[in-house]
Amino acid sequence: MIKLLRTLINIVIGITELILTFRLIFKFLTVNPETPFVAWLYGVTAPLAAPFAKILPNWTFSGFVVDFATVAALIVFALAGGLLLMIFPYPRKEPATVVVSTDV
């Protein structure tokens, strides 16, 4: 049961980190937000990055944008996933018993 829970946590955190990473890359490259996939991605990840929106202002240089709300969300979700995995440790396997025969 714990193994299944750990797998589920890894999948959810992995997908969350993946879509947030795409958001960070797309914001950095200032892709067209009107394309369907980018609009969907921004819509899905907006609630994930919203709590961190006003921590630091975005940096803009030479047409590139660093979205610090997304960076903060990536860090927080990675730490939260790590902490959740610490709560549910791997189940310990019992060591195999070895029977040694003393018959000669």
Image (tube, rainbow, N blue to C red):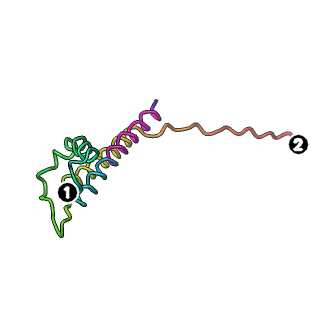
Q: Secondary structure at mark 2?
A: loop
Magenta region: 2-17
Neighbourhood count class around disc 1 (C-alpha, 10 Å): few under 14, some 14–19, many 20 upward: many
In this rendering, the label closer to the viewer, 2 or 1? 1
Asked whether residue 44 is drawn in magenta, I would say no
Q: Give residue 99's position: percent from left, percent from top.
A: 74, 38
Quarter of the image where one finds residue 29: bottom left
Residue pictured at 22% horizontal, 52% vertical: 70
The foreground one among 55 and 79 is 55
Locate residue 103 relative to residue 70 in the image: left or right. Answer: right
- Judged from this view, the residue extending furthest toward the top is 1
Residue pictured at 40% horizontal, 42% vertical: 10
Residue pictured at 18% horizontal, 52% vertical: 69
- Judged from this view, the residue extending furthest toward the right is 104
**Magenta span: chief secondary structure:** helix
**Is residue 63 shown above or below 9?**
below
Identify the disc placed on residue 67: 1
The foreground one among 102 and 49 is 49
Asked whether residue 14 is drawn in magenta, I would say yes
Q: Give residue 53's position: percent from left, percent from top.
A: 14, 50
Quarter of the image where one finds residue 48: top left
The foreground one among 51 and 92 is 51
- Judged from this view, the residue extending furthest toward the front is 35
What amino acid does circle 1 point to?
Asp
* Residue at numbered disc 2: 104
Q: Secondary structure at mark 1?
A: loop
- Tags 2 and 1 touching, CB below 8 Å: no
